[in-house]
Image (spheres, rainbow, N blue to C red):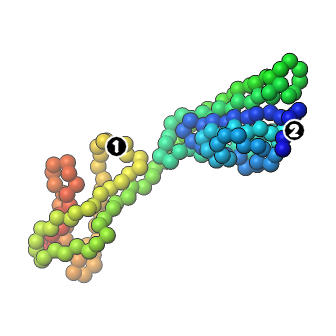
């Protein structure tokens, strides 16, 4: 238990990321967890300083831009004279862009196509976590036609739809 005559309450909040604590010795967690976007805990002055020296930050997946870690500390009137005293401080963070790879999804089943026929390849899609929903852009798809008896080409429709066609021998 935290000694009430020396206890402080600490709140930590990140808007677009998570904050964590490497040290939780002597902390009484009141809200959140030790790896979340918001936490509130009570501790002795010494244990609070130990925990604050171990604060970590991690940006949310696929988020980049500005973020802030906000700190609020209150002695709840337990330190000094004159009642509760609180303090607020913030640390601005510039979360840098990291290129995440695109993923191409293909059907989980084999495809059959008669020789020299055009066959619609269904169930192929591209996911890019850095590409905003509704945005337009381009991708390059490279195929390997070097294996024996695996000759062909991919043809794409010209109507904004991703419609690959496979033709053997062409």
Q: Quadrant of the N terminus?
A: top right
Question: In the rendering, at what x and y percent does residue 82 appear?
Answer: 86, 18
Taking depth in this image into account, of 13 and 136 the one nearest to the observer is 13
Chain-order first, disc 1 or disc 2: 2
Q: Quadrant of the C terminus?
A: bottom left
Residue that appears at 22% across and 63% down = 122
Quarter where residue 77 is shown: top right
- Local secondary structure at mark 1: loop
Q: Is residue 133 visible?
A: yes
Q: Is residue 149 left or right of residue 32?
A: left
Q: Name the residue carrying label 2.
A: 3
Q: Is residue 88 above or below residue 31?
A: above
Q: Is residue 57 visible?
A: no
Crowd band around label 2 with a 10 angstrom C-alpha radius: few (<14), some (14–19), many (20+): few
Quarter where residue 162 is shown: bottom left
Residue that appears at 84% across and 41% down = 2
- Local secondary structure at mark 2: loop
Mark carried by residue 133: 1
Q: Is residue 140 above or below residue 106?
A: above
Q: Is residue 113 above or below residue 59?
A: below
Callout in the foreground (1, 2):
2
Crowd band around label 1 with a 10 angstrom C-alpha radius: few (<14), some (14–19), many (20+): few
């Amino acid at each position: 238990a935290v000694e009430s005559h020396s206890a402080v309450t600490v709140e930590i909040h990140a808007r677009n990321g998570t904050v964590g604590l490497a040290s939780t010795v002597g902390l009484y967690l009141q809200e959140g967890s030790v790896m979340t976007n918001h936490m509130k805990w009570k501790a002795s002055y010494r244990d609070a300083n130990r925990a604050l020296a171990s604060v970590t930050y991690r940006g949310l997946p696929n988020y980049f831009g500005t973020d802030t870690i906000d700190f609020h500390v209150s002695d709840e009137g337990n330190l000094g004279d004159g009642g509760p005293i609180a303090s607020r401080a913030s640390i601005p963070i510039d979360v840098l862009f990291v290129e995440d790879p695109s993923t191409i999804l293909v059907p989980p089943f084999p495809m059959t196509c008669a020789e020299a026929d055009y066959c619609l390849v269904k169930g192929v899609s591209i996911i890019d976590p850095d590409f905003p929903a509704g945005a337009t852009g381009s991708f390059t798809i490279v195929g390997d036609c070097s294996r024996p008896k695996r000759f062909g080409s991919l043809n794409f429709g010209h109507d904004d739809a991703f419609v690959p066609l496979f033709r053997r021998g062409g």
